[in-house]
């Protein structure tokens, strides 16, 4: 698995990219697939975001944006990493 490099300078572009990749992995329609997100913290300060989409038959696919590491890790519904994307430019880490 080779990591690609993309620029996602805004929170909206990050969310759209993550939703599209998670949905395409399981052939889900991004317009009809709910996506949830939560702020991740390390030592009491925000360090990234966790995303997951839910599909039919209890399917849950996830992604973790590690803001400090400038990368996004994608996991399938059984927890296996299926992709990694490095960010050449990313949004600011949201404050809790």
Image: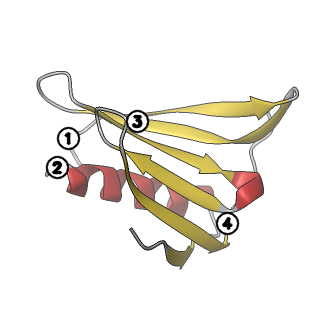
Which quadrant, please, contains the C terminus? top right
Give the residue drawn at x 18%, y 48%: 26
Q: Earlier in the sequence, mark 4 or mark 2?
A: 2
Dot label at residue 29: 2
Give the residue drawn at x 24%, y 39%: 33
Marks 2/1 in contact by CB < 8 Å: the verdict is yes
Q: Which residue is mark 4?
A: 90
What separation in Å lies between label 4 and label 1 (alpha carbons)?
26 Å
> Which x, y percent locates residue 66?
66, 50
Dot label at residue 89: none
* Left or right, 74 with reference to 12: left
Q: Residues within 10 Å of mark 3 (few under 14, many from 20)?
A: many
What separation in Å lies between label 2 and label 1 (alpha carbons)?
5 Å
Answer above or below: position of 27 versus 87: above
Q: Earlier in the sequence, mark 2 or mark 3?
A: 2
Marks 4/1 in contact by CB < 8 Å: the verdict is no
Marks 4/3 in contact by CB < 8 Å: the verdict is no
Which quadrant, please, contains the N terminus? bottom left
Q: Secondary structure at mark 4?
A: loop
Marks 1/3 in contact by CB < 8 Å: the verdict is no
What separation in Å lies between label 4 and label 3 (alpha carbons)?
19 Å
Give the residue drawn at x 28%, y 34%: 77
Answer above or below: position of 65 versus 51: below
> Which x, y percent locates residue 2?
43, 73
Please tell me in which quadrant of the rendered image residue 72 appears. bottom right
Please tell me in which quadrant of the rendered image residue 11 appears. bottom right
Q: Which residue is mark 3?
A: 52
Marks 2/3 in contact by CB < 8 Å: the verdict is no
Dot label at residue 32: 1
Q: Earlier in the sequence, mark 1 or mark 3?
A: 1
């Amino acid at each position: 698995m080779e990591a690609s490099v993309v620029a996602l300078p805004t929170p909206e572009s990050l969310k759209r990219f993550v939703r599209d990749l998670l949905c395409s992995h399981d052939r889900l329609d991004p317009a009809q697939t709910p996506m949830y997100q939560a702020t991740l913290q390390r030592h009491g300060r925000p360090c990234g975001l966790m995303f997951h989409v839910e599909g039919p038959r209890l399917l849950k696919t996830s992604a973790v944006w590690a803001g400090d590491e400038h990368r996004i890790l994608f996991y399938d519904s059984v927890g296996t990493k299926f992709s990694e994307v490095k960010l050449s430019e990313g949004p600011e880490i949201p404050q809790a």
